[in-house]
Image: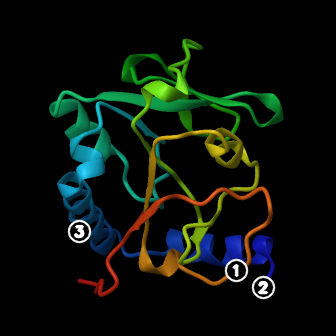
Amino acid sequence: MDKKKLRTTILTMLKSQDREWKSHYDKRLAERLFCLPIYQTATTIAVYLSFDFEYDTTLVIERALADGKRIVIPKTYPKGKMIFVDYDPKTLVTSSFGVPEPESSQEVAKEMIDLVVVPGVVFNNQGYRIGYGAGYYDRYLKDYQGETVSLIYPSQLSYFIPQKYDIPVKGLLYEKSATHF
């Protein structure tokens, strides 16, 4: 199956997940993340603002802020450029993709970010991902030296061959034995 068809198939599955199961799963996965050394030692964490069918990143944002960590979120520009900006829920605007993003353009340098929570639609077991097709994260992560992790549902795992410009995440966090409630 090609990337486009695989993306469409998995997105359809994600959008049809049982909301109660998803909520329980998201919370369990968040707790696993909070126990990891990459989370515990991070002082600045880059997190995307999720669609309602994706892993609920508000769980990570709220806990990280409560833990005194700095949260930065993506801001996108034409031609695949993306930066991370300090999270301020009072100054969010809707992007051309329909997701909230910061109004500010005050970039936080890559070397200041300890951990990037990376979105994606499909992942293989080497950490390669199929995103939404614009390549923002692959471009950003190309020379990023910190830690990367994706929090995913088991249904997002699939076999595919990455392309030469794809950048894998260093860790995939999911429950292999997840059951529906």
Q: Position of residue 137 (x, y in %)?
A: 64, 46
**Other-residue count near label 1 (Cα within 10 Å), few / some / many at <14 / 14–19 / ≥20:** some
Considering the numbered disc 3 on the image, is that residue within a helix, a strand or a loop?
A: helix
Which residue appears at 57% of the width and 39% of the height? 144
> Is residue 154 rendered to the left or right of residue 27?
right
Considering the numbered disc 1 on the image, is that residue within a helix, a strand or a loop?
A: loop
The answer to the question of whether label 1 and label 2 lie on touching residues, with beta carbons closer than 8 A, is: yes
Q: Position of residue 92 (x, y in %)?
A: 49, 23
The CA span between labels 3 and 1 is 29 Å
Q: Amino acid at mark 2?
A: Met
Quarter of the image where the C terminus is located = bottom left
Location of residue 88 (image quadrant):
top left
Which residue appears at 70% of the width and 72% of the height? 8
Considering the numbered disc 2 on the image, is that residue within a helix, a strand or a loop?
A: loop
Instruction: Compare marks 1 and 2 and give the one earlier in the sequence.
Output: 2
Q: Position of residue 47 (x, y in %)?
A: 43, 40
**Other-residue count near label 3 (Cα within 10 Å), few / some / many at <14 / 14–19 / ≥20:** few
Which residue appears at 27% of the width and 64% of the height? 29
Q: What number is the disc on residue 24?
A: 3
Q: What number is the disc on residue 160?
A: 1
Location of residue 168 (image quadrant):
bottom right
> Is residue 154 rendered to the left or right of residue 66?
right
Q: What number is the disc on residue 1?
A: 2
Instruction: Compare marks 3 and 1 and give the one earlier in the sequence.
Output: 3
Q: Amino acid at mark 1?
A: Phe
Q: Nearer the viewer, residue 112 or 75?
A: 112
Which residue appears at 39% of the width and 18% of the height? 90
Q: What number is the disc on residue 127?
A: none
